[in-house]
Amino acid sequence: MEKMFFTSIRNFLIDEAKSTDRGKLRRRFAKRLDKDDRFRKVPGTSPRWALTAHPIDATWQGELDELVRAAWEARGVWITAWNHSGPTPKATVQALMTVLTAVLEGAGGAVREEDLAKALEARFDLLTPPQFTTLYAHDGALIDPVGGQEQETDPVGAEIAAGEIWQEMSPQERRLMPHLDDDPAEVATLLGIGPHQTYAIMEALSEKLRLALTGDGSDPRDVVAVLLRRGGDPP
């Protein structure tokens, strides 16, 4: 009876996890990995995936940040369409598989399905809910988002943080930095490509910056200001 009781609880929790957005994402890419000979599933209470080229007993045991970094190293891929039901667009499948391959290659062994989903979320900002900040009160007065206290600026920290982000950016991304708020049709002329592709690249760069500016410790506004200044400098 005890075994049946705990089995029932475990099955209930599994069903609850599958119904979440991350659970749906896991099922979406797991089906693709299972049909691809390049990948191997390691069964268990927490399923893992590895490349078939990796040794059977190789298991990744690092930090999640390492997987996210490997995901961002997969250049030239982005997601322009994400549906929450129905077939996954072909271009989206290709982007997911490219990033998953890069993550597993960087890991060098089997990675938990849950961690793969988290790396995809960070790379494409798939499941992050929008965040809103009230700027004006009912009387029209400007609201300070930090509670009316003036924040101390750290120009040195902002320069260091911006420098690290700048080093990770491609020449194309550096050229786009001052134009993220511009019309993609106008920016397309600068890059010499189509407006739709330009829009996708601009969105991917925006997501990359949002991830890099999260939890850095520096004021994101100061870091962005340094990046904009660098983007405006002559090559």
Image (cartoon, rainbow, N blue to C red):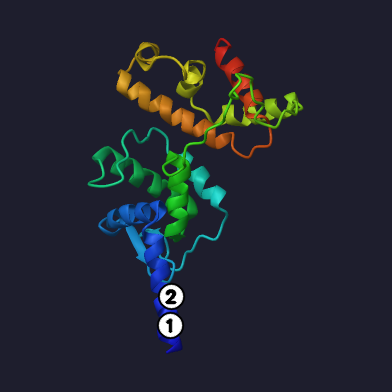
The N terminus lies in quadrant: bottom left
Front-most of residues 219 and 73:
219
Which quadrant of the structure image shows residue 121?
top left
CA gap, disc 2 and disc 1: 6 Å
Q: Image height check: is 119 above or below 203?
A: below
> Contact, CB < 8 Å: mark 2 with mark 1?
yes
Farthest residue toward the front?
A: 139
Report x, y in % for residue 32.
28, 53
Around disc 2, counting alpha carbons within 10 Å, would you say few (fewer than 14), some (14 to 19), or many (20 or more)?
A: few
The front one of 172 and 47 is: 47
Q: Is mark 2 on a helix, strand or loop?
A: helix
Which amino acid, by three-letter code, is at mark 2?
Ile
Q: Percent x, y for residue 5?
A: 43, 82
* Quarter-of-image position of residue 61: bottom right
Q: Mark 1 points at which residue?
A: 5
Question: With respect to residue 175, does 150 lie above or below?
Answer: below
For the C terminus, the image quarter is top right
Q: Residue at x 60, y 25 (%)?
A: 137
Residue designated by label 2 = 9
Which sits in the foreground, 96 or 9?
Answer: 9
